């Protein structure tokens, strides 16, 4: 597979695109097939040797901290994702995103926002989580409070404005004159042109300053924070003596991967509360140019690398799926065949003329990652559990289940499907009759 790596620290010229081995997941890891990867300022710091977490002992090193793609492989202990799940991730520093396949821990990963394509989703994780943690985890921002965000038009800043507004806060931000309309449309209540106005002269005291600029801007920010408020920065440690004198909390932080927060952000995006701004896209081989663009140009929003083409998936409406899944069951009752178990997949292309809408399962018939809902008798009641095919040749399954009501089993399977076309099989153990009230296949 292709990856952008560095073998030494330095300028953009140290970045090379190389063929390396595709990773294999450990028991509690997944492999993501990468469709797009975000470019962030920290990538350039790592490349220059200015990020202490990555040292010469880590070279050669794949750059990149966040991606969007789909699950290509999963370790034996992973139960939260299935093969084919569309996801996005904020990666730990051990693994880089500028590559075609990347390892990740499940707690770094979340289902991608359904309303975004891969490019838009890849732009979110690091910047979105950085904004979330700065505002809420470190800044303690609450509904009804006031926040001043320095650098509101950038990658982190444009998420911070929208997250703060979604929380119910009042938002002021500093930007250049060319970005005033952009941040106003994101919901900023007060927009300050930092070139022509001094924010400390025009902003009433705030509960939180979220500093994405540093330097003199940070020093001047102490004067606009209410006693008991906070000054939080991603860049440099604020003056502790001045913070103590003014009775405010002051801190610098480094964002940490958090899949739960990615899920919250995805929900806000799909609810229309957060829009994602992508300034420009580059091919994987243009990673050096992408980093230069981020450093040298005035960027509004994010820069993203397009790593691989995402295959378009057909969308099948509910009525069609239901017809394919239930035609035989409803019209003919339980099909005749083997005594012990029957496995069926709606709309299988290899179905026979006699039964065009289902196919009896045999080892190797269901792709790896297919969902299986097994129903059986437990006492005088029918129970079910969900599992997935781990090895088609050996007919091996994982995702072992907890016994549950048939309806709950269908709901669990639906929650782990990548899309409407993902294979779903049903196994009926001998003596169990199909009941269409349990749920839908597909």
Image (spheres, grey):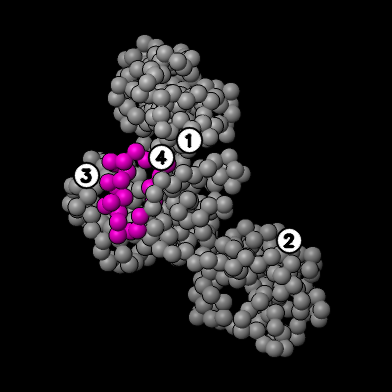
Q: How many C-alpha atoms fall within 10 Å of the one at disc 4: few (<14), some, or many (≥20)?
A: many
Q: Earlier in the sequence, mark 4 or mark 1?
A: 1
- Tell us which disc is closer to us: 4 or 2: 4
Q: Earlier in the sequence, mark 2 or mark 3?
A: 3
Q: Earlier in the sequence, mark 3 or mark 4?
A: 3
Spatial separation of the CA atoms under disc 2 and disc 3: 55 Å
Q: Secondary structure at mark 1?
A: helix
Q: Bounds of the magenta span?
A: 282-304
In the picture of the structure, the residue carrying the numbered disc 2 is 407
Question: Residue 182, labelled with which disc?
Answer: 1
Q: Is residue 146 above or below residue 78?
A: above
State the residue in front, 19 or 409: 19
In the picture of the structure, the residue carrying the numbered disc 4 is 300
Spatial separation of the CA atoms under disc 3 and disc 1: 32 Å
Residue drawn 34% across and 14% down? 242
Residue lying furthest front in this view?
A: 178
Q: Earlier in the sequence, mark 3 or mark 1?
A: 3
Q: Position of residue 129 (x, y in %)?
A: 45, 41
Spatial separation of the CA atoms under disc 4 and disc 1: 9 Å
Q: Position of residue 408 (x, y in %)?
A: 70, 58
Q: How many C-alpha atoms fall within 10 Å of the one at disc 3: few (<14), some, or many (≥20)?
A: some
In the picture of the structure, the residue carrying the numbered disc 3 is 48
State the residue in front, 16 or 237: 16
């Amino acid at each position: 597979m292709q990856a952008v790596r560095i073998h030494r620290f330095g300028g953009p010229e140290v970045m090379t695109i190389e063929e390396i081995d595709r990773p294999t997941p450990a028991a509690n890891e997944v492999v993501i097939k990468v469709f797009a990867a975000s470019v962030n300022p920290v990538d350039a710091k790592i490349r220059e040797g200015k990020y202490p977490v990555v040292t010469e002992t880590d070279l050669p090193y794949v750059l990149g901290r966040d991606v969007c793609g789909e699950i290509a492989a999963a370790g034996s202990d992973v139960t939260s994702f299935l093969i084919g799940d569309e996801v996005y991730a904020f990666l730990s520093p051990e693994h880089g995103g500028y590559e075609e396949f990347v390892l990740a821990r499940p707690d770094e990963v979340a289902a991608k926002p359904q309303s975004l394509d891969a490019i838009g989703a890849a732009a979110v994780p690091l910047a979105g989580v950085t904004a979330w943690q700065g505002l809420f985890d470190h800044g303690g921002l609450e509904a009804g409070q006031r926040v001043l965000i320095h650098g509101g038009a950038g990658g982190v800043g444009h998420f911070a404005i929208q997250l703060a507004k979604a929380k119910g806060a009042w938002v002021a931000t500093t930007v250049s004159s060319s970005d005033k309309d952009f941040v106003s449309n994101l919901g900023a209540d007060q927009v300050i042109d930092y070139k022509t106005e001094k924010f400390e002269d025009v902003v009433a005291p705030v509960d939180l300053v979220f500093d994405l600029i540093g330097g003199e801007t940070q020093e001047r920010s102490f004067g606009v924070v209410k006693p008991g408020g906070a000054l939080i920065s991603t860049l440099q440690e604020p003056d502790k003596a001045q913070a103590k004198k003014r009775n405010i909390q002051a801190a610098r932080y480094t964002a940490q991967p958090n899949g739960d927060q990615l899920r919250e952000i995805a929900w806000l995006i799909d609810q229309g509360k957060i829009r994602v701004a992508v300034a420009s896209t580059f091919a994987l081989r243009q990673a050096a140019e992408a980093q230069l663009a981020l450093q040298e140009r005035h960027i509004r929003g994010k820069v993203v690398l397009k790593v691989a083409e995402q295959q378009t998936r057909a969308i099948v409406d509910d009525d069609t799926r239901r017809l394919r899944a239930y035609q035989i069951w409803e019209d003919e009752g339980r099909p005749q065949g083997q005594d012990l178990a029957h496995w069926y997949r709606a709309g299988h292309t290899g179905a026979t003329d006699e039964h065009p809408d289902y196919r009896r399962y045999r080892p190797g018939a269901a792709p790896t990652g297919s969902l299986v809902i097994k129903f059986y008798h437990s006492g005088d009641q029918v129970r079910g559990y969900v599992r997935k095919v781990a090895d088609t040749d050996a007919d091996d399954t994982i995702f072992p289940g907890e016994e549950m009501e048939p309806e709950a089993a269908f709901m669990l399977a639906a929650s782990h499907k990548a899309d409407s076309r993902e294979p779903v099989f049903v196994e009926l153990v001998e003596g169990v009759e199909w009941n269409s009230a349990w749920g839908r296949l597909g």
